[in-house]
Image (tube, helix red, strand yellow):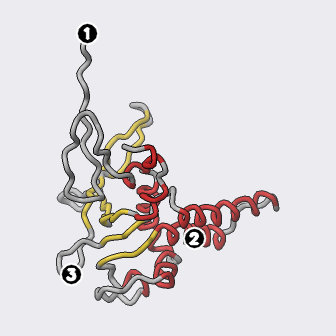
Amino acid sequence: MSLSDLNTTPHHERGITHHVVFNHPKRNALGNIIFERTGGTDEEPVMAPVLDRTEALFNDGKPVELILAGPDSDRVGKGQRVSFDIERRAAFEERPVTTAESVEANVARWCSAVLGWNNLPRGWVDKSGKDDPIAYSDENAKAMFAQTGMAWLGAQIDGVLMERNRFLPVSSASSEPTPPTSSKDQRPVSRRRSRKS
């Protein structure tokens, strides 16, 4: 790794391909949602549904993909500033953020991260229910994310943006070789070094 690689902006500007997934609650034979204990005490357990992650596939079996810029890119930075400005304005006026402002902040943040997409169904953008692919445009992204029913996809984008390392190249100058990956969206498997006494 050279010192120029420490500037992460170029890698984040290029972006990565993210395969969209659905998180469906698992159900038992009777159709009831299966829950698992995630914390709490024996008297007051905290339960959450067990989720089944399924890759979103288009009609031809190809994955629905978003091309996402990283959190250190200029465009994502601008989207974040719009979101922060909305929160600051509300705080300055000593009032809560309105629903419309919250939607505006989310749309700005999510749209700033999306560089493009592949195999995205038209119905996700225009609520038509049609499954033919729709081309990426800023207007289509804004229309899609402005719908309350698409917040699940925005939440996936937020999750990806929290993983900065997904946007960085694999170092070629490490002391131990890293196994190659088949997709630029995958993280390499790290290896532990054994301690010598």
Q: Would you say 56 lies left or right of 92 here?
A: left
Q: Relative to 63, say whether 71 is above or below.
A: above
Measuring from the top left, give residue 183's x and y in whole percent.
Answer: 24, 59
Q: Relative to 6, say whether 122 is above or below.
A: below
Residue 32 appears in the rendering = no
Element type at marker 1? loop
Q: Residues within 10 Å of mark 3 (few under 14, many from 20)?
A: few
Residues at badges 3 and 1 in contact (C-beta under 8 Å)? no
Measuring from the top left, give residue 133's x and y in whole percent.
Answer: 31, 85
**Which mark, by number, is residue 59?**
3
Q: Would you say 120 lies left or right of 181 here?
A: right
Type of the residue with mark 3: Asn
Q: Reading the chain from its start, which is encountered first: label 3 or label 2?
A: 3
User: What is the C-alpha distance between the residues marked 3 and 2?
Assistant: 29 Å
Type of the residue with mark 2: Ala
Q: Nearer the viewer, mark 3 or mark 2?
A: 2
Which residue is the extreme one toward the right? 93
Q: Quadrant of residue 19?
A: bottom left
